[in-house]
Amino acid sequence: LYFFSTKGVDFPVYKKYLDFFLYDNIQTENNQGLIYYFINALSVFLRKDSLNSINEIVFFNSTIQFTNFILYVIGTVGLFKLLKSYKYEINTIFLSLTLLHWIPKIIELRVLLKPEIVTFSFLPWIILGIDDYFQNDNKKSLFLSLFPLSLILTSKGSVSGMIIIFIFIMYVLKLRHKKIKEIAVFTLVFFVLCLGVGYEN
């Protein structure tokens, strides 16, 4: 409950990405995606009136945890909708999500300045959109899923590897029921999005 995000092991490395948006001439190192740090920087700008030289550590700690909490809530709502779409009972979903909140890795996800929480936030919504396309032929849902998918695939190498393998295993057999031309168009749009986001990063 009293963990300081600024005391995290990787904080000095990831803080440079936050500094990139807050200050000039900051060199970043690991070629991470910038969306997570940009969202954190927006939170800092929204709360900057309460920042001073005395409370800097507490300010950044609360800002990081507030941003992570918002992303966590978005992901949790997405998980709720995803489990509901898989026909789980409401009581089972609530019990599962309640237990999820207390898993040590999830607590760590909420308190550290690390971009993995963006994946937690976006992935359920991406799966919902792709499922909707394959089940109901809703092209709009798939198209809307491509942008957040491109954001998380360009956020961190280890994350993108896991997501690509997951999506391949989950949907490769369903591709044979779709038109090759249609899939090719969506794949092209997706690659253009990834190249655009990657270039911006």
Image (cartoon, rainbow, N blue to C red):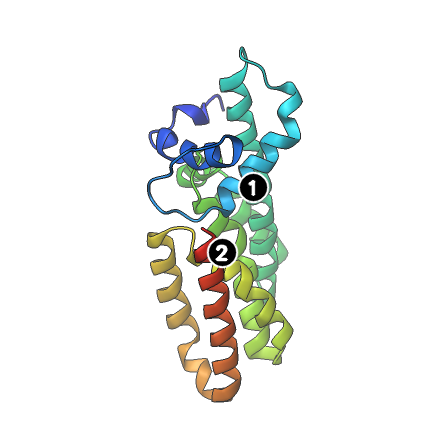
49 left or right, relative to 117: right
32 left or right, relative to 123: left
Q: Amino acid at mark 2?
A: Leu
Residue 87 visible here: no
Total labels drawn? 2
Residue 141 visible here: yes
Q: What residue is rendered at 57% in x and 49% in y?
A: 76
Q: What residue is rendered at 55% in x and 78% in y?
A: 134
Q: Are marks 2 and 1 in contact (CB under 8 Å)?
A: no
Residue 170 in the image: state x and y as whole percent: 42, 71
84 left or right, relative to 103: right
Residue 168 in the image: state x and y as whole percent: 38, 71
Determine the image quadrant of residue 130: bottom right
Which residue is label 1 attached to? 39
Relative to 78, say whether 167 is above or below: below
Q: Element under label 1? A: helix
Q: Element under label 2? A: helix
* Residue nearer the viewer, 8 or 93: 8
Q: What residue is rendered at 52% in x and 18% in y?
A: 56
Relative to 37, say whether 157 is above or below: below
Q: Nearer the N terminus, badge 2 or badge 1? A: 1
- Taking the view exactly as shown, the residue that stands out farthest to the front is 25
Measured in 3D between alpha carbons, the distance from the residue under mark 2 to the one under mark 1, in whole angstroms, is: 13 Å
Q: Amino acid at mark 1?
A: Ile
Which residue is label 2 attached to? 151
Residue 106 in the image: state x and y as whole percent: 45, 41
Relative to 83, say whether 112 is above or below: above
Q: What residue is rendered at 44% in x and 56% in y?
A: 199
